[in-house]
Image: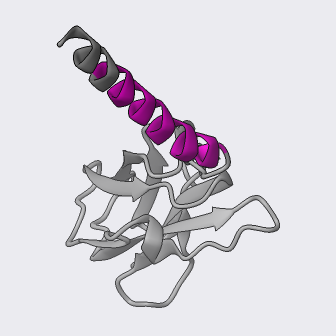
Amino acid sequence: MAGLLFALASPAAAADVSFDRAAVAMSVGERVTLASTISNPGAGPSGQILAHLNVVSLTDSVYVDPEDWSSERSQVIEDLGPGEARTLSWPIQAVDAGSFAVYVVLLPDTGRGPLVVSPPVHLDVAGKRTLDAGGALPVVLVVPVLLGLGAGAIRYRRARNR
């Protein structure tokens, strides 16, 4: 799963980014940690690299605020020598149900030049069933009545046995 290769600081310096998996199935509220590997397949040093995590919805009706999904969205790699690689961890918590893509963008240290984008990790997030009050009224009414009848029966029995 190699990412796109672009020059960062110079034509000889390049970086590549990939994730440890292509897809994750989870439920709202669950947490997962994704790992991305940033490597320098070039002949020269990479220079400082800013790795930035992004989350986008693949479902039209779902708004995504990436800060809600991960508290660690940017990480800096000081320098990668030729052939060197570094693994970054990205904690993610599913906030909404739907289909999402998570990807990392590498920004060069100069702030100019092409960006390197990882292949996306597809998140399939299932909704979480919550309790509702739909069947609560019968329970609220019947349980106290049954407890009262039981207590009355015990009291009646004790009174008869005396």
The residue at 38%/50% (across/down) is 36
Report if residue 137 lies within the magenta region.
yes
Picture coordinates of residue 72, whole percent (x, y): 31, 69
Give the image location of residue 107, x and y in percent: 44, 77
Q: Residue furthest top?
A: 161
In this rendering, is residue 6 above or below 18?
A: below
Look at the picture and state if 141 lies above or below 52.
above
- Tell me: 152 left or right of 121: left
Determine if the magenta segment contains residue 13. no
Q: Is residue 104 visible?
A: yes
Q: Measuring 28% from the left and 55% from the top, which residue is drawn there?
A: 82
What secondary structure is the stretch in magenta mostly built from?
A: helix
76 above or below 128? below
Which corner quadrant holds the N terminus?
A: top right
Residue 59 shown left or right of residue 95 in the figure: right
Task: Between residue 98 and residue 110, name the one nearer to us.
Answer: 98
x then y, percent, for residue 19: 46, 45
The answer to whether 158 appears left or right of 140 in the picture is: left
Residue at 54 percent across and 74 percent down: it is 115
Q: Which residues are magenta?
A: 135-154
